[in-house]
Image (spheres, rainbow, N blue to C red):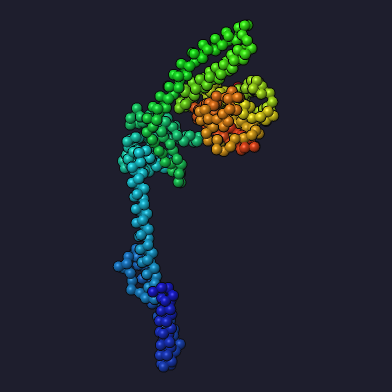
Amino acid sequence: MNFSSSLKSEITWVLSGFIGVLLAGFALGWPSVAVILYLGGYVGWLLFRINALVRWLDAGAKASDAPPTTGLTNEIVQLVHREKKYSRKQKNKYRSTLAQFNSLAADLPDATVVLSEDHEIRWANAAAQILLNIHPDRDKGQRIDNLVRVPEFREFLHAEDGIEEIEIAGPVAPEKVLAVRKVRTGKHMTVLIAADITQRVQVREMRKAFVADVSHELRTPLTVIRGYLELLRDDPSLTKEFATSIDQITDQSDRMRGIVDDLLQLSKLEGNLLGKNEGVLVNVQAMVESMIAPLEEISADHHVTLDMQPNLHLVGSERELYSAFNNLLTNAVRYTDAGTTIHVKWESDSDGNAVYTVSDNGPGIEARHLSRLSERFYRVDASRSRDNGGTGLGLAIVKHAAQRHGGTLHIVSTPGTGSEFQITFPASRSNTSVIASNQ
């Protein structure tokens, strides 16, 4: 029975009763009284049925306790039965999906912990006990920083400067290295994911050691070669043809020495974060201004403008920061055409982060190259890079120097419009008012 048939049945029943009572009232001579009594009785019976429905719904609407009823109220009972049946199916479906998700999450090889806004543990998988010594049931409701007492982890957990991943020694097995990430999700919730990257770190360290050893070994023969080349170049009996050849060999030797030096610098930078209090106070404005004059040796046909925030200083390695800032500036000169305007900006953003930006109105770079620009030896135009004396390692050095200081390198470029290279340093490494007052 659907709603329309129930309504028709209810109306038919009411009209039939009304006509019967009305005829009886005429027969007895009291039609008005009969109608009033009938309507009052119908209203009372309807209220009785509605009251029974309300009590049934309030008691949980069990099918076995459904009140006997008819017409529209019976249709209401049937609708409630159908909705409860559908709701049970949906709950079972959601329960099954949730169970599957919990099973999959529990079996993940990476430790996964869900934290509240106060860093209390809401949920953890089995791997969290293995890697972080966090029991999924026993430690629920505990603050995670009371259980994982690694100083770097605590700083990372409470940091608000955008650092999303750190490497720490394992709380359970200190010989293991864990990469810990945090992901903000839901309403003030945080998901922590810790992965065992011991093998990856070992491979990385082996590669760094190999590169450093090979680079050191290459420096000695290159120094010897360069010395003999200088002796040959000073020989007055040298013909013009041989002199040209010696100059070419010298240029390639210098280029190789540059590659070796950059590789050595990269091996020192990669994977080693500076401590929060490590480094010296660097006057970035003075540093950048000192870079301008040497640029004329590369090209005197570029127009360089500076927009520097004078009291904005940075705590870090002066040598590494100089290398990063200078690489971006010299790249802008090397890889753009004569007449290009290069704009250098040093400022603090709305969040207090320190931002170094080098932009130009040059030819720009196609989007397909942008994600790979900071890879070792990656070149957009290999022949042009070599002609300009580039080693293919400059942006890799910039990226790792920025990461050493907790910063990030961001590149935006549009062909035909220009490029922008930006390093953002966390506010914890910059200071304006205190530094200005102490000078």
Q: Quadrant of residue 230?
A: top right
Q: Nearer the viewer, residue 194 or 334?
A: 334
Instruction: Please name the residue shown 36% across and 48% down the image.
Output: 101
Q: Is 358 left or right of 208, judged from the image as shown?
A: right
Q: Quadrant of residue 431?
A: top right
User: Does 275 sit above or below residue 133?
Assistant: above
User: Does 232 sit above or below residue 434?
Assistant: above
Q: Nearer the viewer, residue 376 or 350?
A: 376
Instruction: Please name the residue shown 61% across and 38% down the image.
Output: 414
Instruction: Please name the residue shown 41% across and 93% down the image.
Output: 27
Q: Quadrant of residue 240?
A: top right
Q: Quadrant of the C terminus?
A: top right
Residue 307 seen in render: no
User: Does 104 sit above or below residue 176?
Assistant: below
Residue 248 seen in render: yes
Q: Position of residue 253 (x, y in %)?
A: 55, 17
Q: Position of residue 332 (x, y in %)?
A: 62, 28
Q: Position of residue 60 (x, y in %)?
A: 34, 63
- Residue ranking furthest to the top: 236
